[in-house]
């Protein structure tokens, strides 16, 4: 007989959608448990909150563009939730980061204006809410830019980044710093840990200072600390006497890990529980309700009973939705109906990677309250929702945060109503 546990809400998935929903549920007084087979795309994505970057042209003011975007995309998650659902979610997230375990670390921006930040290869990317450590990289600001490579880091090529920025008309150049990190090779995570150390920063700044020219903004790979990114970034600015900004690297993503750490910290502070390495493989139903989920952890099965389930298991990328050899898509966790499959005979994929990809609009069929079709107690959040093309729209984390906030509020309202009855 497998052990059996009971919660008010079980949240499936530990990406931005699942963790933000779970944390707000815990903060609202619900007994909540997050089950996830692994971490989500936080550890891969750049750590910015993109709300609406393209519609289809580049968007300057996401808040102002949302009305028209929603009117043109009535099936989009933003249309279901309403544009007014986004701002409170961003505010909650920014406050959560500020109260987090990384002292002084904060996000800046919002719906008023997109920042235009460089990617690792020097393309320019619009993003609404960004880490303070990236904000000085806004390419709308004038003045010369020096992109700094760290020789030991193979996931960031300053010359490629600066070269493409120059092609976009920005006065950019590249330099490279050779530092001893005490290992043969380091990835972003290893280097971020080095930057948490003040002695390492002092040695690094001493070498870099000699290479900088007056008035340059300094772009460094996004490795400026994991434990204390605000301290590392401020310290480097002070030592160099230049504005410093982080540029996202290839995975692993240190800024994404900071988000994960802050959300998990807030979840636990609110009394919530996270069980990582726990794959949901089965479900128990009572009429229209999912009454329990069965999860496998280290070879053991545990049954989690709950009044409410939040499905935040992601989409194709996380294996929550699969396309079979019969060309049928299926939701792999709870077996829920999907929506958004391109009709037979219509193209499913586009030849241009960043162009329209019809399959990316497939997700779990939901009603306008984000309740999964044919269920009375399963809410859906994040990339599991249908109707969006996050890569093309630049909307991934915006959808995850807004829907996480939205479903948490919906469940809490049900709980309050039930308690009052
Ligand atoms: C490399 C990369 C770069 C990106 N860049 C951007 C960007 O620049 N801008 C942008 O807006 N968006 C970007 N995104 C997209 C964005 O990160 C996602 O759209 C969004 O964060 C999805 O979050 P989520 O919480 O819905 O799902 P995910 O983060 O995918 O999390 C899914 C969770 O569900 C869990 N799970 C899945 N199946 C099961 C199961 N059976 N049992 C238990 N747990 C399960 C997974 O382990 C994981 O914890 C990027 C994504 C990636 C991967």
Image (cartoon, helix red, strand yellow):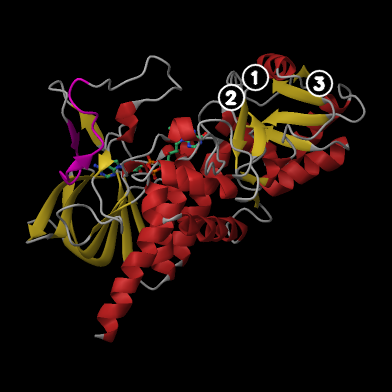
Between the residue at mark 2 and the residue at mark 3, the CA separation in whole angstroms equals: 29 Å
Q: Is residue 237 visible?
A: yes
Horizontal and vertical percent position of residue 215: 90, 31
Between the residue at mark 2 and the residue at mark 1, the CA separation in whole angstroms equals: 6 Å
Q: Quadrant of residue 310?
A: bottom left
The crowding category of the residue bearing disc 3, from other C-alpha atoms within 10 Å (few below 14, some 14 to 19, many at least 20), is: some
287 or 72, nearer to the observer: 72
Between the residue at mark 1 and the residue at mark 3, the CA separation in whole angstroms equals: 26 Å
Residue placed under numbered mark 2 in the picture: 186
Looking at the rendering, in which quadrant would you find the C terminus?
Answer: bottom left
User: What predominant SS class does the magenta segment belong to?
Assistant: loop
Q: Is residue 44 visible?
A: no
Q: Quadrant of residue 418?
A: bottom left
Badge 2 or badge 1: first in the primary sequence: 1
Tell me: 45 left or right of 168. left
Residue at position x 84%, y 26% in the image: 144
The crowding category of the residue bearing disc 2, from other C-alpha atoms within 10 Å (few below 14, some 14 to 19, many at least 20), is: some
107 or 67, nearer to the observer: 67
Residue placed under numbered mark 1 in the picture: 152
Q: Are marks 2 and 1 in contact (CB under 8 Å)?
A: yes
Task: Tell me the SS state at disc 2.
Answer: loop
Residue placed under numbered mark 3 in the picture: 171
Q: Is residue 335 located in the magenta-colored stretch of the structure?
A: yes
Tell me: 97 left or right of 321. right
> In the displayed structure, would residue 3 be above or below residue 256?
below
Horizontal and vertical percent position of residue 225: 65, 41
- Segment tinted magenta in the rendering: 329-345
Tell me: 26 left or right of 92. left
Horizontal and vertical percent position of residue 37: 30, 42
Residue at position x 73%, y 29% in the image: 219
Looking at the rendering, in which quadrant would you find the N terminus?
Answer: bottom left
Task: Tell me the SS state at disc 3.
Answer: loop
């Amino acid at each position: 007989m497998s052990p059996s546990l009971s919660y008010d809400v079980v949240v499936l998935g530990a990406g931005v959608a699942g963790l933000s929903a779970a944390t707000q549920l815990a903060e609202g007084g619900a007994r909540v448990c997050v089950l996830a087979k692994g971490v989500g795309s936080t550890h891969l994505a750049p750590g910015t909150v993109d709300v609406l970057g393209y519609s289809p042209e580049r968007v300057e003011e996401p808040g102002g563009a949302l009305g028209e975007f929603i009117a043109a995309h009535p099936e989009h998650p933003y249309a279901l939730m309403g544009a007014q659902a986004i701002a409170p979610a961003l505010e909650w997230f920014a406050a959560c980061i500020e109260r987090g375990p990384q002292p002084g670390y904060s996000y800046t921006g919002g719906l008023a204006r997109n920042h235009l930040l460089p990617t690792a290869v020097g393309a320019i990317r619009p993003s609404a809410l960004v880490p303070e450590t990236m904000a000085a990289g806004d390419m709308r600001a004038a003045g010369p830019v020096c992109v700094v490579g760290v020789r030991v880091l193979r996931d960031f090529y300053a010359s490629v980044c600066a070269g493409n920025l120059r092609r976009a008309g920005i006065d950019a150049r590249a330099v490279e710093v050779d530092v001893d990190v005490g290992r043969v090779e380091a990835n972003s995570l290893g280097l971020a840990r080095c930057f948490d150390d003040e002695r390492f920063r002092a040695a690094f700044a001493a070498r870099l200072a000699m290479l900088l020219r007056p008035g340059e903004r300094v772009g460094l790979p996004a490795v400026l600390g994991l434990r204390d990114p605000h301290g590392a970034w401020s310290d480097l600015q002070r030592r160099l006497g230049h504005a410093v900004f982080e540029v996202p690297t290839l995975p692993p993503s240190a800024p994404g890990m900071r988000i994960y750490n802050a959300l998990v910290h807030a979840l636990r502070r609110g009394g919530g529980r996270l069980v990582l390495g726990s794959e949901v493989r089965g479900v128990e139903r009572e009429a229209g309700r999912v009454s329990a989920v069965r999860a496998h952890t280290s070879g053991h099965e545990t049954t989690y009973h709950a009044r409410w389930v939040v499905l935040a298991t992601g989409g194709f990328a996380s294996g929550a939705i699969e396309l079979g050899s019969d060309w049928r898509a299926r939701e792999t966790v709870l077996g829920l109906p999907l929506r958004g499959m391109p009709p037979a005979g219509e193209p499913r994929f586009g030849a241009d990677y960043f162009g329209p990809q019809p399959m990316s609009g497939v997700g779990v069929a939901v009603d306008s309250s984000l309740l999964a079709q044919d269920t009375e107690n399963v809410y859906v959040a994040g990339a599991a929702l249908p109707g969006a093309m996050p890569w093309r729209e630049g909307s991934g984390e915006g959808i995850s945060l807004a829907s996480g906030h939205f479903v948490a509020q919906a469940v809490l309202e049900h709980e309050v109503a039930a308690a009052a009855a």
